[in-house]
């Protein structure tokens, strides 16, 4: 069974699938303060759960991305969303730390299954407006990060820690809907592979050297993002001395601001160039994060979370779209690396940051993130913008519009 849906609508379906997948991982930072208070886990253990969410994905997601480039299997998206809903949602039922670790790992594997095919499909149905299309897709993940904490805090307040099970509802429903659309999604995947084969025959090349430079910057940005979402709620809990529900709400503020910035960033990238938006966002992250660290006033620190999340996420969807543009013959692999592997890298670093927090406290961890932001900003200036492909319309910006000069990339 399959509903008849207009082609352009499938971009929004991918966005909604991304949202339902990332609700689960987005909820994890909001659950950590409850686990620390009620289960007595340490900073290192909390960071270890973040690693469980991302660590396995660091190995398998590029493999899934490569598979998507060779032979797309849209049913893997529905399986991924289903598995994501089977993991973090069970945390409230476990007393064993290793049971928690395995449950969170399942969500990580589910996420790794969804993202490469989801990113490739979103790229294809976006047509020429890749920045906008990928920003719409990426904002689904941002909104999942915003809704997940609110949903899980609601469930925990209503039912206690077993209320984490509420996270499974949207994931299971979306998994079923995606499976119903499998036939149409498979036809899009076949069209995409044929278009790529024709472009390769016409001489389309991959620029792996530039892609590796971008990947390093994306990894650094991910380290900052995962570090902030993991340790900011704990900073509110243990440094600003706020209760668990208030501390958990910071993840929602970060995610909503990130969603708005992701939509804006992709559209700006289509107009001004991917690399300009990436560099500007990373540059402005630095002072925003410094102000959050130095402030001990709750209202000011909370207010500064908004520009911090926005500047960090201006760079996200342009990075994904730029990666896909640099290696157009391997869009699934590029999606797996810039969205999945990058996120996993941040999760792999988080246990080291958690160990530092156990021994030195939280402020030194946030200062390390400032240093990473400086490094990412400096390295971003070595990354070129997207090349103009044969037959593609030149990207317009304010100079081409008003001066009639070809866009500089």
Image: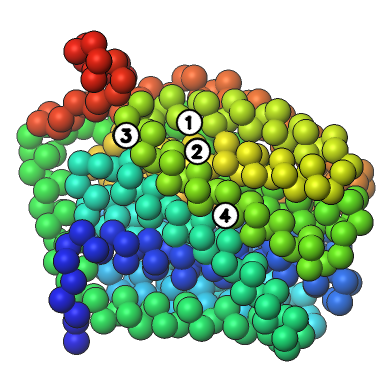
Label 3 sits on residue:
270
Label 1 sits on residue:
278
CA distance for labels 2 and 4: 13 Å
Q: Position of residue 384 (x, y in %)?
A: 38, 22
Please, what secondary structure does the residue beneath circle 4 have? helix
Please, what secondary structure does the residue beneath circle 2 have? helix
Q: Name the residue located 70 percent from the left edge and 33 percent from the top edge.
A: 288
Label 2 sits on residue:
314
Q: Position of residue 150 (x, y in %)?
A: 64, 69
Q: Position of residue 105 (x, y in %)?
A: 60, 69
Q: Are marks 2 and 4 in contact (CB under 8 Å)?
A: no
Quarter placement of the C terminus: top left
Q: Name the residue located 87 percent from the left edge and 44 percent from the top edge.
A: 297
Snapshot quadrant of residue 241:
bottom right
Using the image as rendered, state which of residue 201 and residue 47 is in the foreground: 47
Measured along the vertical axis of the image, is residue 384 above or below residue 18?
above
CA distance for labels 1 and 2: 7 Å
Q: Are marks 1 and 4 in contact (CB under 8 Å)?
A: no
Closer to the eye: label 1 or 4: 4
CA distance for labels 1 and 4: 19 Å
């Amino acid at each position: 069974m399959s509903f008849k849906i207009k082609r352009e609508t499938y971009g929004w379906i991918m966005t909604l699938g991304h949202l339902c997948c990332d609700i689960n991982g987005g909820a994890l930072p909001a659950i950590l303060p409850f686990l620390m208070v009620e289960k007595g886990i340490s900073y290192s253990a909390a960071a270890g759960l973040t690693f469980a969410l991302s660590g396995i994905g660091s190995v398998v997601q590029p493999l899934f991305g490569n598979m998507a480039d060779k032979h797309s299997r849209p049913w893997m998206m529905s399986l991924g969303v289903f598995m994501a809903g089977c993991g973090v949602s069970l945390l409230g039922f476990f007393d064993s730390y290793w049971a928690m670790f395995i449950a969170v790992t399942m969500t990580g594997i589910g996420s790794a299954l969804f993202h490469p095919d989801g990113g490739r499909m979103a790229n294809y149905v976006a047509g020429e407006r890749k920045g906008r299309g990928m920003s719409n897709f990426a904002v689904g993940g941002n909104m999942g990060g915003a809704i997940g904490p609110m949903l899980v805090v609601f469930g925990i307040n209503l039912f206690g820690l077993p209320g984490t099970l509420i996270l499974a509802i949207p994931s299971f429903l979306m998994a079923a809907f995606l499976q119903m659309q499998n036939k149409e999604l498979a036809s899009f995947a076949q069209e995409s592979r044929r278009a790529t084969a024709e472009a390769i025959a016409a001489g389309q090349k991959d620029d792996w050297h530039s892609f590796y430079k971008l990947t390093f910057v994306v990894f650094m940005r991910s380290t900052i993002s995962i570090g902030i979402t993991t340790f900011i709620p704990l900073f509110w809990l243990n440094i600003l001395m706020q209760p668990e529900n208030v501390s958990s709400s910071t993840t929602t503020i970060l995610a909503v601001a990130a969603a708005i910035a992701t939509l804006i960033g992709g559209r700006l990238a289509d107009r001004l160039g991917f690399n300009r938006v990436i560099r500007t966002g990373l540059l402005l992250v630095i002072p925003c994060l410094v102000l959050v660290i130095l402030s001990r006033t709750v209202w000011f620190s909370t207010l500064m979370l908004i520009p911090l999340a926005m500047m960090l996420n201006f760079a996200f969807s342009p990075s994904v779209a730029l990666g896909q543009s640099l290696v157009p013959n391997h869009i699934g692999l590029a999606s797996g690396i810039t969205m999945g592997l990058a996120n996993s890298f941040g999760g792999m670093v988080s246990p080291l940051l958690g160990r530092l927090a156990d021994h030195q406290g939280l402020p030194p961890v946030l200062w390390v993130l400032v240093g990473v932001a400086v490094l990412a900003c400096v390295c971003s200036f070595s990354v070129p913008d997207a090349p103009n492909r044969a037959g593609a319309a030149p990207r317009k910006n304010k100079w081409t519009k008003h001066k009639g000069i070809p866009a500089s990339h």
